Amino acid sequence: MRRCCGASECTCAIKVGSGLTLTGNGSASTPYKIDAPPLQVGCGLTGTGQSGSPLAARPAGGSASWATSWSCDAAANSTLKCDPNTGQLWTPPEHSSAAATARQDHWPNSWGGPTMGVTGWLIADSNIFSEAVYTADSLTRCRGVSFAVTFTAHVDLSWTAGSTFEIGYAVSIDGSGPAVRRLSGMATPNSPAGRLFASVSTHHAAVYAPHVGGSARVYPAIQVMTGNVTIVTWQTELVLTAMTR
C-alpha cells in the first residue's frame, strides 16, 4: 500500500473493496480503520452484523431447545433441511385437509312403479347414484392423500305378507364395475305385511399417490326373493374427508 502523503502523521483514505474504505495511517494516534455500510438484513434475521449486534435468527415465538417440545432425536426427526445444491433451507410442504357432506333424495316411486315383484339384484337406474370424488392435485401438488367416505341410506319400505328381500348399494370404486354390498333386508317368508324405516351405511377408504385422483359411487339396489316390495323413499347421505399424508 503506498503512502498517501509525505508526513507520518497524515491520514489516508483508500478504497480497498466494494463498499469498504480504509482510513488512518497506522500510528498509535491514528490507527487504520475499515468502514463499511451496514449489512442488509433479510427475512428471518436480526442484528447488524457489527460487534455487539451479531446476526441471529429471528423466531416469532422466541428461542427454545428441541428437548423443550420433543423427546425424540432431533437429527432423525427435524424437517428443516439444507439443499446442498443451492444452500437453501427447506421443510416439507404443509399438510391440508378437507371435508364435505351431502344429502340426496333418489325417490319416491320413480323406479318404474311403486311395487316390485320377484327380481335378482337390481340397480335402480344408472342415472341414480351418489358419488364422492377426489380430483388430483386439488388438495396438494406434493403429498399423497388419504380419502374416506361414508354413504348412509335412509330407506322407507313397505311389503306384502310373505315377502323376503334385501337392500344395499352397488358400489363402483375409481370407475370399476359396480359390486353389490348387502346391507339389510327381510329374511322371514311368513312375516306379515309391514313397513320399515331403516338407516344403513357402507364405507370406502383409500390412499392416493401424488397427482392421482379417485372416486366412490353408490347406486341403490334391491333384491326381492318373494312377495312384493314398495320403495316409498330412499335418501343417501354422504360424509367425505380427505387429508394429506
Image: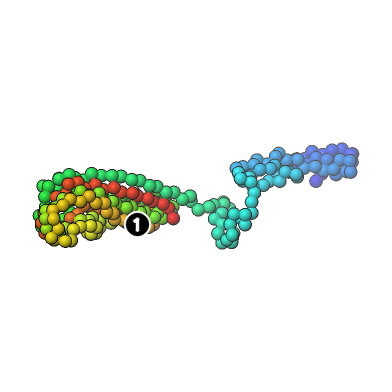
Q: In which quarter of the image is residue 37?
A: top right
Q: What residue type is labelled 1?
A: Ala
**Picture coordinates of residue 200, whole percent (x, y):** 27, 54
- Nearest the eye: 215 or 117: 117
Instruction: Report if residue 158 is visible in the image.
Output: yes
Where is residue 30 drawn, in percent x and y?
86, 40
Q: Nearer the viewer, residue 156 or 236?
A: 156
User: In x, y percent, where is residue 54?
Assistant: 71, 46
Is 102 above or below relative to 92? Answer: above
Residue 13 placement (x, y as % from top left): 79, 38
Q: In this view, does 186 lie to the left or right of 54?
A: left
Badge 1 is on which residue? 205
Q: Which residue is drawn at 80% across and 46% down?
A: 1
Q: Which residue is drawn at 88% across and 43% down?
A: 27
Residue 17 visible in the snapshot: no
Categorize mark 1 by other alpha carbons within 10 Å: few (<14), some (14-19), many (20+).
some
